[in-house]
Image (cartoon, grey):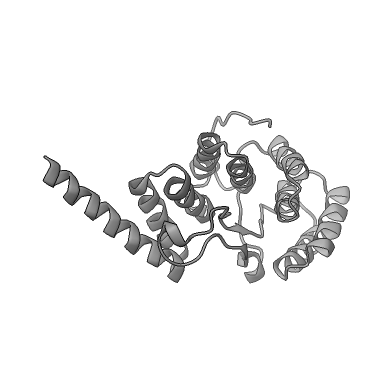
């Protein structure tokens, strides 16, 4: 997988920006409420419809993108894939369309196609946070946990308010890297960015309890 080196932080251009309320719709949710023992062992973190900076794209292109995003948010992957592919044929230089195609391919268990779409997005913009987030999810599925962490961290470096990367880092650190303190930190940052999330609230409470229990045990040992 080609992973370009990041050389600067984003200044707003090429970052994820909601086009309409539908773009905030969460399509895939990882795990279930409770502690790590109750979370699905193959839990995927969240993937949302990915938007992007549209300032240099004609109004008709924005309309096409919004229509495709609405179909994706509704869960019609087949139609959404067709619409995003049509969009890419007309406007190939917009990384958001490639990032959304990566979501669709991943949902269809086609990691090779997802990788190709992620690569296309990063070739257009090596600092595009949604594509880096999708890269992290792909690497996580492949068991490359440290590489996945690096991709998520780069997404946050380029777009500090990108909540989904914080969510994914929370899942990765808790379930796969067994790092409770970093997991808590990222879940709290995710919550601060998006507001209420009852599922994540429960995970935060559980992580705090486990960290306190671990500290008490350490104190007794000393």
Figure check: 80 above or below 165: below
Q: Which quadrant of the view contains residue 59?
A: bottom right
Residue at image coords 78%, 67%: 76
Q: Where residue 37 sits: x, y (%)?
A: 43, 58
Q: Judge by depth and name the residue closer to the eye, 163 or 172.
A: 172
Residue at image coords 38%, 44%: 179
Quadrant the C terminus occupies = top left
Across the whole image, how many numbered discs are drawn on residues?
0
Q: Judge by depth and name the residue closer to the eye, 190 or 123.
A: 190
Figure check: 197 above or below 40: below
Q: Is residue 196 visible?
A: no
Q: Where residue 208 sits: x, y (%)?
A: 29, 58
Tell me if 140 is positioned left or right of 209 in this view: right
Residue at image coords 42%, 62%: 191
Q: Judge by depth and name the residue closer to the eye, 86 or 202.
A: 202
Q: Is residue 48 visible?
A: yes
Q: Where residue 127 sits: x, y (%)?
A: 60, 39
Residue at image coords 44%, 42%: 177
Q: Which quadrant of the view contains residue 140?
A: top right
Quadrant the N terminus occupies = top right
């Amino acid at each position: 997988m080609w992973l370009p080196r990041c050389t600067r932080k984003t200044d707003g251009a090429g970052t994820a920006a909601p086009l309409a309320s539908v773009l905030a719709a969460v399509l895939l949710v990882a795990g279930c409420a409770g502690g790590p023992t109750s979370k699905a062992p193959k839990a995927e973190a969240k993937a949302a419809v990915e938007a992007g900076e549209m300032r240099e794209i004609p109004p008709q292109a924005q309309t096409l993108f919004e229509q495709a995003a609405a179909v994706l948010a509704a869960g019609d992957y087949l139609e959404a894939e067709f619409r995003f592919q049509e969009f890419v044929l007309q406007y190939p230089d917009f990384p958001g369309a490639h990032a959304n195609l990566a979501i669709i391919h991943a949902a269809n268990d086609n990691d090779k196609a997802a990788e190709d779409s992620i690569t296309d997005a990063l070739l257009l913009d090596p600092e595009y946070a949604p594509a880096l987030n999708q890269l992290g999810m792909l690497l996580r599925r492949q068991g490359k946990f440290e590489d996945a962490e690096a991709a998520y961290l780069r997404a946050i470096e380029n777009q500090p308010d990108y909540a989904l990367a914080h969510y994914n880092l929370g899942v990765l650190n808790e379930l796969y890297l067994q790092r409770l303190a970093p997991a808590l930190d990222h879940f709290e940052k995710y919550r601060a960015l998006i507001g209420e999330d009852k599922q994540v609230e429960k995970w935060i409470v559980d992580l705090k309890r486990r960290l306190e229990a671990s500290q008490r045990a350490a104190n007794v040992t000393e």
